[in-house]
Image (cartoon, rainbow, N blue to C red):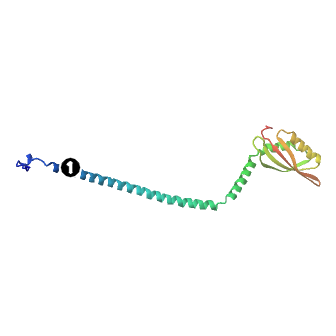
Amino acid sequence: MRPYLNFSPKPFARKDPLGFIFILINSVICIAVILSALYLWQIQRANQQHSGEFSRLELKKELLNEQFAQLNKDLKAMDLRAYDKEVRFYAGIQQELNAPWVNLLDALGSALPDGVRVQQVSSDGSTGEDVGQTIRLLAYARTKKDELVLLKRLQDMQDFSHVLIMNEVYEKPAIMFETRLIYHSDKGN
């Protein structure tokens, strides 16, 4: 075996292939370490951003839970049955206001005989748009004949249907009677 001796100046010196491989491997390792460090830095930044967002979401969740607890407490405190009763009461008032009172009273006035006096007219609520408005009539008649004349006139009018006597009390000197009927505001007009 011959030893390798090179006496030429440095620029002409022959490079050792193992040294070149060693430098190449060291360069690749350095680049890999730098890239790993950059990747780790980006992961930490992303983790910090997500951590901040997660903290904000946790805070928002706590606030929403507090609001939900307050609303749940308010809902338990609210008496829904009383509220429902109040809504029904106001719906009844609205139904009363929806009755066509002027036309109804004109029609009743034209049907009244001389011996009958109306004490009270009230609406019992609508029975539907096609059927009409249910009306309760409390009146006094001098005689039974006057009462029957009123009922017959109401039955003969197109504005009224289902004319029924609900109650009748004989008091001196008159007869008090209660009638229920259905008023159709659109038939007579």
- Residue 19: where, in percent of width, then height? 16, 51
Q: Is residue 12 left or right of residue 177?
A: left
The residue shown at (56%, 61%) is 69
Graded by Cα atoms within 10 Å as few (under 14), some (14 to 19) or many (20 or more), the crowding at tag 1 reads: few
Q: Where is 37 relative to 104, above or below?
A: below
Residue that extends furthest to the front in the rendered view of this protein: 1
Considering the image in quadrants, where does the C terminus appear? top right
The residue shown at (87%, 41%) is 155
- Residue 178: where, in percent of width, then height? 87, 50
Name the residue carrying label 1.
Answer: 24
Q: Residue 102 or 90: which is nearer the viewer?
A: 90
Q: Where is 133 relative to 70, above or below?
A: above
Q: Is residue 133 left or right of residue 80?
A: right
- Residue 104: where, in percent of width, then height? 80, 44
Count of marks placed on residues: 1
Q: Where is 189 relative to 20, above or below?
A: above
Q: Where is 33 relative to 132, above or below?
A: below
Location of residue 74 (image quadrant): bottom right
The residue shown at (90%, 42%) is 152
- Amino acid at circle 1: Leu
Q: Is residue 153 left or right of residue 133?
A: right
Q: Is residue 7 left or right of residue 187?
A: left
Q: Residue 9 or 163: which is nearer the viewer?
A: 9
Location of residue 67 (image quadrant): bottom right
The secondary element bearing badge 1 is classed as helix
- Residue 161: where, in percent of width, then height? 83, 42
The residue shown at (35%, 54%) is 43
Q: Residue 86 or 57: which is nearer the viewer?
A: 57
